[in-house]
Image: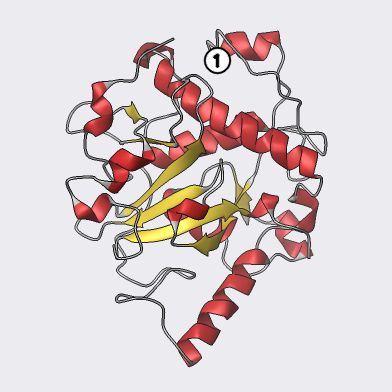
Amino acid sequence: MIESRARDEAEPRGTVGSRSRRVHRRVPGAPAPGGWPSGAGHSQHLGDERLRRGRTPDFLRLNDPADRHAFTGWFTFLAESQYYLAPAERAREVDDCAALVRFAFREALREHDGAWAAGLKLAYVPALPAVRKYLYPFSPLGARLFRVAPGRFTEADLATSAFAEFADAETLLERNCHFLGRDVRHAAPGDLLFYRQLEQDLPFHVMIYLGGSHFDTRPGPWVIYHTGPLGEAPGEVRRPALGELLRHPLPRWRPVEGNRNFLGVYRWNILRDAE
């Protein structure tokens, strides 16, 4: 069994290299400084969340529980596989936190045959079925899996650039996921932990909650993320135990309700029931 690496202790970094903008504003679905608003503010939060739900068309949602299980299994496996590969063997596109998430999302929806595994340098693949509703890149939107335009989905979006192959961490949060809460104990495998670190030029950061490991027999739970470039270095994939992250020496990286930089636990819109 491959041993865990000491580098898991190092500090997470922001989404360096992504296209997030330095905009200091409240993220829809996230708490205002000091906690959740009450009264009219709470109603606004519910409205924000209803809008967030409507941004993903029903035809992309994985309604079958078997498809959801298959997707989250492949999604977490593929993200974690990048940790165990040597840097030169990793998918070339994985260069920051959002890139790791996009890679695992897209590849989880592919057909998983021997040629595919060889192309990704995977020496091991889990005994998981494929998603049956559609396979990438033959989805209802082709290769354009991520919502990038504001507003609710309409039929007119099919003929515009409302969906794209690229989405940065901020766009993944605002237009492709829905808020679950700020108690990380309620996270399920494949959920996303989002942060906003305002002191960084590119403040939005995302981690994947793995739950148990596909490679490590220790119980975990684990999270995984890419640091983004570290100075002149390309950065690295890290996979700390959730307990390590909760005890991080820098409180702004702890996924706890009292940390204003922690935006909460989110889930992909394609895993939400059709409305």
User: Can residue 194 be seen?
Assistant: yes
> Eyeballing the image, is 199 above or below 191?
below
Report crowding for label 1: few under 14, some 14 to 19, many 20 or more residues within 10 A (C-alpha). some
Quadrant into which the N terminus falls: top left
Residue at 78% in and 60% down: 274
> Eyeballing the image, is 57 above or below 118?
below
Quadrant into which the C terminus falls: bottom right
Q: Which residue lies under the disc numbered 1?
A: 120
User: Can residue 142 be seen?
Assistant: no
Percent position of residue 82, x then y: 45, 22
Residue type at numbered disc 1: Leu
Residue at 75% in and 63% down: 156
Percent position of residue 242, x then y: 37, 41
Residue 34 placement, left or right of 27: left
Residue at 80% in and 37% down: 134
> Eyeballing the image, is 223 above or below 188?
above
Secondary element at image label 1: loop
Q: Quadrant of residue 235?
A: top left
Residue 108 placement, left or right of 159: left
Percent position of residue 133, x then y: 82, 39
**196 or 185: nearer the viewer:** 185
Percent position of residue 8, x then y: 28, 30
